[in-house]
Image (tube, helix red, strand yellow):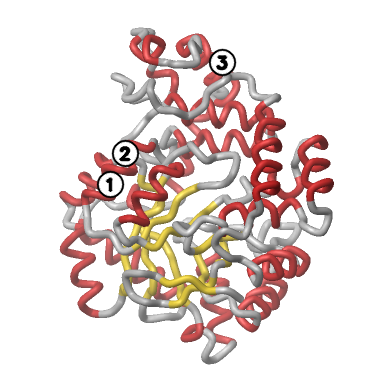
Amino acid sequence: MNYRTDLQSGNQVSVLGYGCMRFPRGIRTQIDSKKTEKLILSAIERGVNYFDTAYVYGGSEQVLGQIFKRNEGIREKIYLATKLPFIHCQSYEDFDRIFNKQLERLNTDYIDYYLIHNITDTASWDRIRKLGIEKWIAGKKESGQIRHIGFSFHGIQNEFLGLLEEYDWDFCQIQYNYMNENYQAGRKGLQKAHEKGLMVVIMEPLLGGKLAVGLPKKAAKLFEETNHAITPAAWALRWLWNQKEVTVILSGMNSEEQLDDNIKTAETAEIGILTGKENETIKKAVSVFKESYKIPCTGCNYCLPCPNGVNIPGSFAAYNVSYASGFVTGMMQYMTSIGALNPGKNQSGKNCTVCGKCEKQCPQNIKITKSLKKVTRRLEPVGLHTALKVYRKISK
């Protein structure tokens, strides 16, 4: 296993992290604890030392806690990350209520890397700042219950850059892959976070698995012809590890085959690993994906800020992904893009008032207001927001 240094602490963190949202599940959707335990123990034995879960990952924290309980000593061998669902916090007391529940679930008395989960903008941070989150974090760090504090991000690039300045963060987690180079925080955000000395954790490196098993045939052929010994998943991971700003890549491995392939790739992960020819192949593969795009948005963000808060490039990216990589993947991306799970935020295209400001600034001359209507027709079906309200209520 290769390791990279967390510049804040000096910790040597495995370049491959274990994303714990997609543990293998049985026919009744419950996590298969035996299969999961076998995978977790195998990953630790082979050098993976960063494990990422969350309060809202349906049983993930509890399963991990039971694995720690049954296998003495492994908790101390890893760096454990979990997340605070800030949308469920309405008072200062909620921070402790949720955190203490997480410690109980995980059978631990400290968290190595704690994140504010799914933050989309500075306004969201301001809301929990007013509840006293900074005082709470300081207390937890002083007691040793939280070792490092960060945030996971789903929003537009300018908001990410703003959040970096709002607090003295230790690390951050962003969605980033060769198809999403200019999406959300993007390469600019990645580089800025690295410049500030933050450890950067990458989520969705395979775009929900689509860059591993959902490639267009033409793109898969390009990879095969360039280097038939490298799997599609390995191409995507190597593209990330090629960049010095990337510290850890999370992968939700739910089979031995996925674990073996990713660890094999991680063992050769080096900055600058890609050849010039391989970089060109990835660029060609991206072009193949974009041939199926319905809206020619490049994610330049010139259309922002929208006076009504619409996440225009994020909406277009999700819409295009829904065609290129499947409706479910596109829908999930759209939900995070518009802050659908945050009751105080709505960046939906339905907020568009057709003021036309964005279209005057678009270098691609996209008919943005008409395109947003297409997006909401496809990705905001009837009953969606009612279902989201129910979800927010039952997931507290």
* Residue labelled with disc 2: 159
Q: Nearer the viewer, residue 263 or 45?
A: 263
Q: Tell me the amino acid under the disc marked 2.
A: Glu
Q: What whole-number distance in Å separates the C-alpha atoms at marks 1 and 2?
A: 6 Å
What numbered label is drawn on residue 163?
Answer: 1
- 390 over 100 or under it: above or below: above
Could you tell me residue 141's position as x and y percent? 24, 73
User: Is residue 124 shown left or right of residue 324?
Assistant: left
Residue 71 as seen in the image, left or right of residue 121: right
Residue 44 is drawn in which quadrant?
Answer: bottom right
The residue labelled by disc 3 is: 374
Label 2 CA crowd tier, 10 Å (few <14, some 14–19, many 20+) = many
Confirm or deny contact between disc 1 and disc 2 (CB under 8 A).
yes
Residue beneath the point at 73% across and 61% down:
26
Q: Position of residue 93 (x, y in %)?
A: 22, 61
Nearer the observer, disc 3 or disc 2? 2
